[in-house]
Image (cartoon, coloured by chain):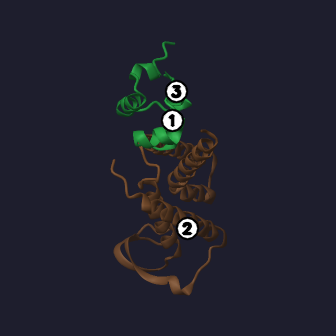
Chain colours: A green, B brown
Amino acid sequence: MKNKLKLFRVAAGLTQAELAERAGVSRQTVYAIEKGKYVPSVRLALRLAKILGVRVEDIFILDET
Amino acid sequence: MKLLSARYHKPALAVFCLSLVAGMFFLIFWPEYDLLNLKVPALYTDELLQPDGKWLVWVRNNVLDEIISLVLIVSGLIVMFSAVEEEDEFMERLRLESFRWAVLISYIILMIAIAGFYGLVFLWVMVINIFAVLILFVCRFECLRYRLKKHTEHEK
């Protein structure tokens, strides 16, 4: 699973800490998602998409290979 | 799974580290304090090399090793089952992964002990392996948390 979370977060002018606070998770979680080390739950993915004003499938891309 | 409050995590971790040091001290120096030679209730007891044991009796025993072991286990379990400050779904996954890893390594140690250690030294490895899951879990989980914290400090 690839993701463009960092791209959308920077575009929204948010720091990791700010996004984490709004999403109700730790900064470590946002870091881990951005680095591709953690695939979030559907609930968190939807929350992140809502905060960033985009669709979930814009942020998270299923790796076809 | 519902976890204990995060306020228990750090004190339990401190007690766990202290009791681990005390446990190693005990294994190396085998100290005996008269004060701790007590009559304690036993579910079952037998003398070395004698097959006839007794159920539900009082025995005289130096309880230092029992105290250290129980404190180590209870504090380790509290560390394992208490939330951390930054608790969320990712921490839950780290906890589960650390537990899986600890169980795997513990059984690898056990397999090596079964296949490669004979005589009294095997019993020593078994005694240490009793605590292996807890020790390995705490080390792994806390290391992962520390590394994550360090990495995120460098990120904007």
Report the disc number at residue A11.
Answer: 3
The residue at 57%/52% (across/down) is B139
Say which residue label 2 marks: B19
**Residue B97 in view in this figure:** no
The image shows residue B84, relative to residue A30, as above or below, that is below
Viewed as shown, does residue A56 lie left or right of B152?
left
Say which residue label 1 marks: A14
Q: What kind of residue is marked 1?
A: Leu
The residue at 61%/66% (across/down) is B21
Instruction: Identify the subunit bearing mark 3.
Output: A
User: Where is the C terminus of chain B found, in terms of image quarters?
Assistant: top right
Q: Residues within 10 Å of mark 1 (few under 14, many from 20)?
A: some
Q: Are marks 1 and 3 on the same chain?
A: yes
The residue at 56%/44% (across/down) is B105
Q: Are marks 2 and 1 on the same chain?
A: no
Front in this rendered view, residue B116 or A45: A45
Q: Are marks 2 and 3 on the same chain?
A: no
Viewed as shown, does residue B151 lie left or right of B2?
right
**Residue most toward the front?**
A13
**Of helix, strand and loop, which one carries label 3?**
helix
Looking at the rendered image, the disc whose residue lies closer to the viewer, 2 or 1, is 1
- Image-quadrant location for residue B34: bottom right
Viewed as shown, does residue A13 lie left or right of B1?
right
- Per the model, the C-alpha gap separating discs 2 and 3 is 50 Å
Q: Residues within 10 Å of mark 2 (few under 14, many from 20)?
A: many
The image shows residue B48, relative to residue A54, as above or below, that is below
Instruction: Identify the subunit bearing mark 1.
Output: A
Report the disc number at residue B77.
Answer: none
Q: What kind of residue is marked 2?
A: Ser
Q: Residues within 10 Å of mark 3 (few under 14, many from 20)?
A: few
